[in-house]
Amino acid sequence: MILYHGSDVEIKCPKIITSEKGRDFGFGFYTTTIQKQAERWAARIANLHTRQDSAEHKPVVSVFEFDEAAAKSLNTKFFEGATLDWLELVIKCRSDIRYSHGFDIVFGKIANDNVGETVEYVLAGVMRKEDAVERLKFEKINDQMCFNTEKALQTLRFVKSYTL
């Protein structure tokens, strides 16, 4: 399986990315199966970094081959769509950056702006989780695959990168 990672630098050797902001599936290296999505991520990151330091940053997409056979021995979680289980994991990871779900790899939908707003409604107690999942069934939600451990990163092989 081919996976894409958008940034403003070429990534040949992926690393677990940690931040103070809660991520959908916790600390990890995030990829997608959707090339255009990675290109949008790359453009957004390059624009953000250009604004931060006034130096021009170029969007770069790094392409990886995922060794599915090697991943069979890992603790993986694959979510089929926006389900209650998926939403509960996203809520736990976004609300507590120290939360560790114990998976090596998580594949599921990405909580984009519209989805993120719905998650915020649940966190604020404005919307029930079940209602949120119903609402999200009508959203076109892209995917993401998060590599949460060093063992998981070993299943990725750098293929190439390109600049937009």
Image (cartoon, rainbow, N blue to C red):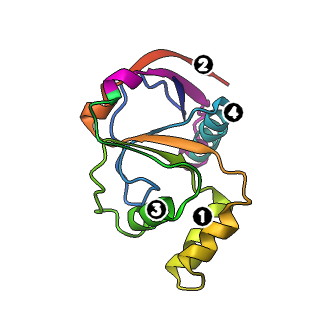
Question: Hey, which quadrant is residue 151 in on the image?
Answer: top left
Q: Which mark is residue 139?
A: none
Marks 1 and 3, the one that precedes in the sequence: 3
Sequence order check: which comes first, mark 3 or mark 2?
Answer: 3
Q: Which residue is mark 3?
A: 85
Q: Residues within 10 Å of mark 2 (few under 14, many from 20)?
A: few
Residue at the spot of label 2: 162
* Residue 55 covered by magenta stretch: yes
Residue 1 position within the rendered picture, expressed as x and y whole percent measured from the top left: 51, 23
Q: Earlier in the sequence, mark 4 or mark 2?
A: 4
- Disc 4 from disc 2: Cα separation: 13 Å
Which residue has dot 1 on it? 116
* Foreground: disc 3 or disc 2: 3
Q: Amino acid at mark 2?
A: Tyr
Classify 97 as above or below 120. above
Q: Which residues are magenta?
A: 49-70
x 26%, y 34%: residue: 150
Q: CA distance from mark 3 to mark 2?
A: 35 Å
